[in-house]
Image (spheres, grey):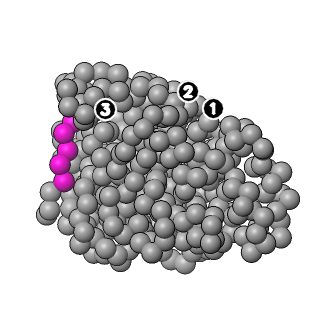
Amino acid sequence: MNGRLTLLAVFFSFSLFAQQSNDHRVIVIMTDGFRWQEVFGGMDSSIVKVKRFHHGDSAAIVSKYWSADVATRRAKLLPFFWNTIVKKGQLHGNRALGSKVDVANPYWFSYPGYSELLTGQVDAAVNSNDYRANPNTNFFEYLNGLPAYKGSVAAFGAWDAFDRILNEKRAGFPVVNAFDSYKSYVNTQASSLLSDMAKDSFRAFGDAEILDGFMHYQAMDYLKNKKPKAMFISYGETDEFAHEGHYGHYLNAAHQFDAWLADIWNFVESDPLYKGKTTILITTDHGRGDAVKSEWTSHGEKVKDCHSIWFAMLGAKVTSLGEVKVSEQLYQKELIHLLGKNMGLDFQSKVK
Ligand SMILES: [Zn+2]
């Protein structure tokens, strides 16, 4: 066996290229610019002690997230990661233990990262957050083209770039991002109320990005009402609050993200259409700088080490490896292919 096959055999508890199951469901969940350092290390004490990062409220942050013991500390920040995923799934990217996950694109910011993840390859021409509608086809578009998934694919994103990243017009499935009107998709009173609240909500990040809570509840509403077989959900506050240099808000956003992952997982486990048939991939679009020189607030090719990311997998046919403690090197562009192989599918991006 070559290295690639050995790797896949470790990842998944099934024979390679198993017959495609029409029942296999998939959810890809991302949170923007969330560092591997906090995933595996919890709150970073060297950041929290800096006044311009704790904004005068270090005591509250420390009492909520600090413990001298790293296992306790990271579980305080991310209880779903460190109580559930670690037992049932896989956590990759703890560089301190040799598990390395990196973006392969040379830019280390959002559009190139999401494009790399969703198209499973690097297109060096994709070099701006303002980049046009993606000429590269993506995994969800591929699924929507298969009879088993046609019309049962949807994407929700806090950031308004997903209409372009996923090329909504060409891809042919709903991409509800930022302040897009949601109520036309689900015809219930609750859906209509969610949609109106989202429209009128405070635009903390301008028109380009909605607060995560509004996006999340619309995504959950869609999941419960429409029961899509394939779904993409993308959160944004971790990146926004890091850019603001507000460490408490950044940690709170990550903590809430973790709680919403638990919501999604609990729904999957409670619904017979999803239970035992759904594979979940959780990751981020790029890393951030280190605490040293305060570069944690930023990212991009000029900031050291922010090619470093992490990912988790959970659910159907995912081997429970827990926190990976062996030497490995994985790239963002490989992750959607791991997921595809897990589903017995072989996706390749095309230029259209
Ligand atoms: Zn950013």
| Residue where numbered disc 2 is placed | 87
Q: Secondary structure at mark 1?
A: helix
Name the disc covering residue 216, or none.
none
Pick the front one: 164 or 252: 252
Disc 3 marks which amino acid? Leu
- Label 1 vs 3, first from the N-terminus: 3
Magenta-colored stretch includes residue 231: no
Horizontal and vertical percent for residue 185? Answer: 40, 55
Q: Which mark is residue 7?
A: 3
Circle 3 residues within 10 Å: few <14, some 14–19, many ≥20: few
Q: In the image, which residues are magenta? A: 343-349
Q: Secondary structure at mark 2?
A: helix
Can you give x and y, in whole percent of width and height, for residue 11 in the image?
36, 30
Q: Is residue 26 left or right of residue 70?
A: left
Residue 83 bears which disc, if any? 1
- In the image, taking residue 1 as reference, residue 46 lies left or right, namely right
The quadrant the C terminus occupies is: bottom left
Crowd around label 2: few <14 · some 14–19 · many ≥20 (10 Å): some
Q: Secondary structure at mark 3?
A: helix
Q: Position of residue 15 (x, y in %)?
A: 25, 21
Q: CA distance from mark 1 to mark 3?
A: 25 Å
Magenta segment's dominant SS is loop
Question: What amino acid is found at the position of numbered circle 2 in the picture?
Answer: Lys
Check disc 1 and give the amino acid type. Answer: Asn
- Whether the residue under disc 1 has CB within 8 Å of ligand 1: no
Q: Is residue 195 visible?
A: no
Q: Picture quarter containing residue 193? A: bottom right
Q: Is the Cβ of the residue at disc 1 closer than 8 Å to that at disc 3?
A: no
Residues at marks 1 and 2 touching, judged by CB atoms closer than 8 Å: yes
Residue at 40%, 54% in the rendered image: 102
Tag nearer the camera, 3 or 2? 3
Examine the rendered structure and indicate whether residue 119 appears above or below residue 134: above
